[in-house]
Image (tube, rainbow, N blue to C red):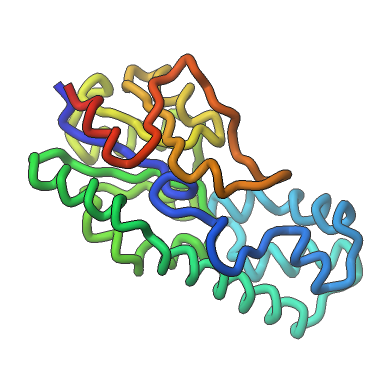
Amino acid sequence: MIKAVVFDMFETLVTLFKGRTYFSENIAEDLGIPVDTFRDAWHKTELDRTIGMYTLEDGLRKSLEMLDACTDEAVELVVRKRREGLTDTFNSIPDEIINLLTELKKRGILIGVISNCFSDECEMIHNSKLFPFFDSAKLSYEQGTFKPNPVIFYRMLDELGLEPNECLYVGDGGSRELLAATAIGMKAVQAEWFRPLAFEPHIPCPVMMEYDQAEKPADVLLYLN
């Protein structure tokens, strides 16, 4: 019997593809740096940004220092525009998501979230209207580890007091999360409802037909039995 639903955050509960999108190519354009050059330096700090070794600002400074392009003005510009984009993201949560979480609560189902995130995203998650729904939140920036490492899944299970087979994991599939969830014994469902909004090169994960599919948030309720 399913006693908890554990969600991914981005492209599952919220999407980065609504409102003011701000991806690496946008940062590069704002700073006058070739896209591939910036992406290479940005990627080199990604792990440390993900596991809480660097704040977003620290990681950005490190990346720009590699390119001899670090100024306070550049950092402030990028931080501001990322915050604007994330504000749009968390102000655009579909009613269908809130309705799903509300229904799960009514049914006595525990709710968790596991997210790979940077410092600014972590702050937004904590301050969002979603956060009060969560019985457990394991955010990579705070946990010092990230999906698909099973450690972050087991930490959630320990906090919820549940076995893997009592949990349903729902995510778009990025970061090999569905494979990681099923590997420890969870049932996994691929969330498809935000997929039509995504565009290259930022589509997180292809459709994975080996997993059950949820075309809309309410479909998650079909997999609780």
- 171 in relation to 187, above or below: below
Q: In the rendered view, does 41 fall on the left or right side of 118?
A: right
Q: Which residue is drawn at 46% across and 36% down?
A: 192
* Position in image of residue 134 (x %, y %): 24, 51
Q: Which residue is drawn at 23% across and 46% down?
A: 100
* Position in image of residue 210 (x %, y %): 47, 14
The quadrant of the picture occupied by the C terminus is top left
Q: In the rendered view, does 125 fall on the left or right side of 55?
A: left
- 20 in relation to 42, above or below: below
Residue 215 or residue 173, whichever sits in front = 215
Q: In the rendered view, does 83 fall on the left or right side of 59?
A: left
Q: Residue at x 75, y 66 (%)?
A: 27
Q: Examine the image and state in which quarter residue 30 appears.
A: bottom right
The quadrant of the picture occupied by the N terminus is top left
Q: Examine the image and state in which quarter residue 126 appears.
A: bottom left
* Position in image of residue 61 (x %, y %): 74, 69
Residue 85 or residue 45, whichever sits in front = 85
- 78 in relation to 66, above or below: below
